Amino acid sequence: MACVLAIDIGGTKLAAALVDREGTVLRDGTVPTPRDGVMAALAELIARVTAGGPRPMAAGIGSAGPMDGVAGTVSPVNMPSWRGFPLRESVRELTGLPVVLAGDAQCFAVGEHWLGAGRGSASLLGMVVSTGIGGGLVIGGVPLLGPTGNAGHVGHMSVDPYGEACECGGRGCVERYASGPNLARWAREQGWRGPDAQALAADAEKGEAVAVAAFERGARALGGMIVSMAAAVEVTTVVIGGGVANAGKVLFDPLERAIEETAGLAFVKAVRVHPTTLGIRAALAGAAKLAWDH
């Protein structure tokens, strides 16, 4: 049976799967991401997933970044043992397969466009809103990866040039307002006493004023960025996943209002926002699709 090898590399887990042309997972596995020896753990996982199965035709990798798509190297923030690590070549040598490499949020977008909430969309922005905010674009059915493979870094689009300084060195970045840790940080600065964004969402659901205000503030930042993307490349569909998206209506209701209040042109107002339907499977699906297309 024809299949490809899909790999998803993150700071907390490594995942791999054999995936057929229709997107069906034939075999899969996950392991925690070790602090050191990441490649050895990945090699063992790949061997387990592929042992006794059909020979894959190619491999697709979605990895946390930053990355250099030209060189095929990655430097994931949460994986200190990998700095400028030659991931694409290492997997090619390990498997003997042609390999395509993209960011994990880009693979999320590709997966949702192929099999998920953005299926068949003419122009899609996929976003992962979690500890950070990443994204990817699929325009006319084709992933937009950019010259160095870093297109879609929507978390570091500025929505306020006079706003807060961001850890990336920029100012007024969406991530500074709408990521999970920054939602909770701002709420604590206003007197909220909870531990994290999950607790903040639960309090917002109950109507606690500061928690509600934190999500409205984050939603305005996300809405401003979405409106800007719609104006720039006529995005018609936005799919949002990640831990913060699990807040549900607490996030999506103020986000819908923010877009309506911010958008002016008719084609910008036409953008539609959906929660992920693939969840944690989206990045693997996107990596598989990139491998098939490759």
Image (cartoon, rainbow, N blue to C red):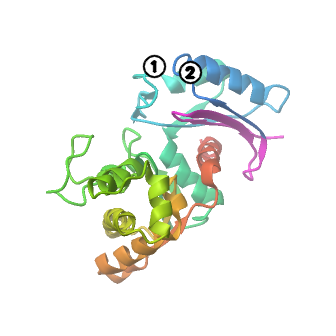
Secondary structure at numbered mark 2? helix
On-image quarter of the C terminus: top right
Residue that numbered label 2 is attached to: 38
Q: Is residue 75 left or right of residue 143?
A: left
Image position, residue 1 (x, y; %): 84, 40
Q: What stretch is highlighted in magenta?
A: 1-26
Q: Residues within 10 Å of mark 2 (few under 14, many from 20)?
A: some
Q: Circles 2 and 1: CB distance less than 8 Å?
A: yes
Secondary structure at numbered mark 1? loop
Going 44% across and 29% down the picture, which residue do you hit? 74
Residue that numbered label 1 is attached to: 81
Amino acid on which the number 2 mark rests in the picture: Val
Image position, residue 230 (x, y; %): 37, 68
Q: Nearer the viewer, residue 195 or 279?
A: 195
Going 36% across and 80% down the picture, which residue do you hit? 260
Q: Is residue 127 above or below residue 216?
A: above
Q: Residues within 10 Å of mark 1 (few under 14, many from 20)?
A: some
Image position, residue 14 (x, y; %): 61, 32
